[in-house]
Image (tube, rainbow, N blue to C red):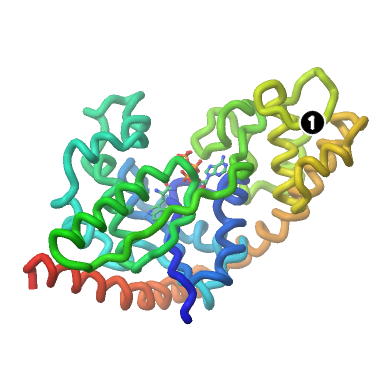
């Protein structure tokens, strides 16, 4: 029997992925690709829901593609493609928008969070309908499983509701997907402000480890990570967020559970511990960085690969779109 279908994606909205994206998404996608028929997209149509400079966006799409591959996504096994290269995403998005309630979309917490600062007047309609486009991504591929961080769970629930509503109204057309919430320990925090998640939009660059940082810079950021004055190496999210974060990072890099790390480092100083974390992160990320730069050295080859994968994706997506249009009486 064929493996179940899996779909996920990330936005090309920064010049590089950071360690949070790597541990919270890429590492886990890599592990899942042998058990699933996986599609991983670079969601550039989602990225333009906030302003992007065209030339920068183009480069960020290539960099993200290179980082997917360097991080272990095998483009021969999984379909790795750019969302905007497959026209069906924008088309299905419109069909789904017509069955999405205005109130329903207004309840999406990410939209509320993202507009909390600038106000809704400053936001685009595209930002408002972002979750409907995400539903189109997922439903076009008859997806069964969607691995996402908990912040995206509500969008996958909306996707399920839209699939069920469509099927009820127009006849069975879509597979109803399930979210798979990625491992809890996988949330990585800012090294300088360990109560906030590591994020591409952080104020202080020293708190974020970029996959494209030079190894020496990565090691320095880890050695300067904020800890506490207690001096013991144990996990305690409330009292010791900095040390706990470093333990989570080391666990993700080495595959050793946090409890075993606590034992291993019992009685040791923060200096020794931080050096161990820095060494482990550099050992994992240096080859990823090198491979990314190598891939970026041949953009024509990268573009060829993305084109071929978009064709594969379009075959699946176009068939689903045709089914949906037929069902709605549009063909
Ligand atoms: P933002 O700065 O807007 O929050 P981001 O770069 O931090 O963006 P997203 O683009 O929202 O992250 O997410 C891409 C993927 O990386 C998602 O699957 C998300 O769950 C995961 N992710 C992002 N930040 C972290 C983090 N700090 N720890 C673990 N996973 C993360
Ligand atoms: N909204 C997601 C990115 C995303 C996605 C998807 C994830 C767009 N389409 C489809 C899973 C499935 C994010 O910001 N992490």
Q: Which residue is drawn at the image coordinates 66% and 59% (left, top)? A: 288
Q: To which residue does mark 1 refer? A: 234
Is there any visible trace of residue 59 in the rendered image?
A: no
Residue 307 x/y as whole percent: 40, 74
Question: Which of the two residues, 30 or 284, is positioned nearer the viewer here?
Answer: 30
In the picture, measured across the screen, residue 296 lies left or right of residue 135, that is right
Is there any visible trace of residue 26 in the rendered image?
A: yes
Above or below, 1 relative to 222: below
For the C terminus, give its image quadrant. bottom left
Above or below, 48 relative to 69: above
Residue 34 x/y as whole percent: 58, 71
Q: Which residue is drawn at the image coordinates 85% and 30% (left, top)? A: 270
Instruction: Tell me which corner region of the image, top left, top right, bottom left or bottom right, holds residue 111.
Output: top left
Specify few, some or many for label 1: CA neighbours under 10 Å numbering under 14, 14-19, or 20 or more: some
Q: Which residue is drawn at the image coordinates 56% and 48% (left, top)? A: 21
Question: Which of the two residues, 114 or 237, is positioned nearer the viewer here?
Answer: 237
In the picture, measured across the screen, residue 328 lies left or right of residue 153, that is left
């Amino acid at each position: 029997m064929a493996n179940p279908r899996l779909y996920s994606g990330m936005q090309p909205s920064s010049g590089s992925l950071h360690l949070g994206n790597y541990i919270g998404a890429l590492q886990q996608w890599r592990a899942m690709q042998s058990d699933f028929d996986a599609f991983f997209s670079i969601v550039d149509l989602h990225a333009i829901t906030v302003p992007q400079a065209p030339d920068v966006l183009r480069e960020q799409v290539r960099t993200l593609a290179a980082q997917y591959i360097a991080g272990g996504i095998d483009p021969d096994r999984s379909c790795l493609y750019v969302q905007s290269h497959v026209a069906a995403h924008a088309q299905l998005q419109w069909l789904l928008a017509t069955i999405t309630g205005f109130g329903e979309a207004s309840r999406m917490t990410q939209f509320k969070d993202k507009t909390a600062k600038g106000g809704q007047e400053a936001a685009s309609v595209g930002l408002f309908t972002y979750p409907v486009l995400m539903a189109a991504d997922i439903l076009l591929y008859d997806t069964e499983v969607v691995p996402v961080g908990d912040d995206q769970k509500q969008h996958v629930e909306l996707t399920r509701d839209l699939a069920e509503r469509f099927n009820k109204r127009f006849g069975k057309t879509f597979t109803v997907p399930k979210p798979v919430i990625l491992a809890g320990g996988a949330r990585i925090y800012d090294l300088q402000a360990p109560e906030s998640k590591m994020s591409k939009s952080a104020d202080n660059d020293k708190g974020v480890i970029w996959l494209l940082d030079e190894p020496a810079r990565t090691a320095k950021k880890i050695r300067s990570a904020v800890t506490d004055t207690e001096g013991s190496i144990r996990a305690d999210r409330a009292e010791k967020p900095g040390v706990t974060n470093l333990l989570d990072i080391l666990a993700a890099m080495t595959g050793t559970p946090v409890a075993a790390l606590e034992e291993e480092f019992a009685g040791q100083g923060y200096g020794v511990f931080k050096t161990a974390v820095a060494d482990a992160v550099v050992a994992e990320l240096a080859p990823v960085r090198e491979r990314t730069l190598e891939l970026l050295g041949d953009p024509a080859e990268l573009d060829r690969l993305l084109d071929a994968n978009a064709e594969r994706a379009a075959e699946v997506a176009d068939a689903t779109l045709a089914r949906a249009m037929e069902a709605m009486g549009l063909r």
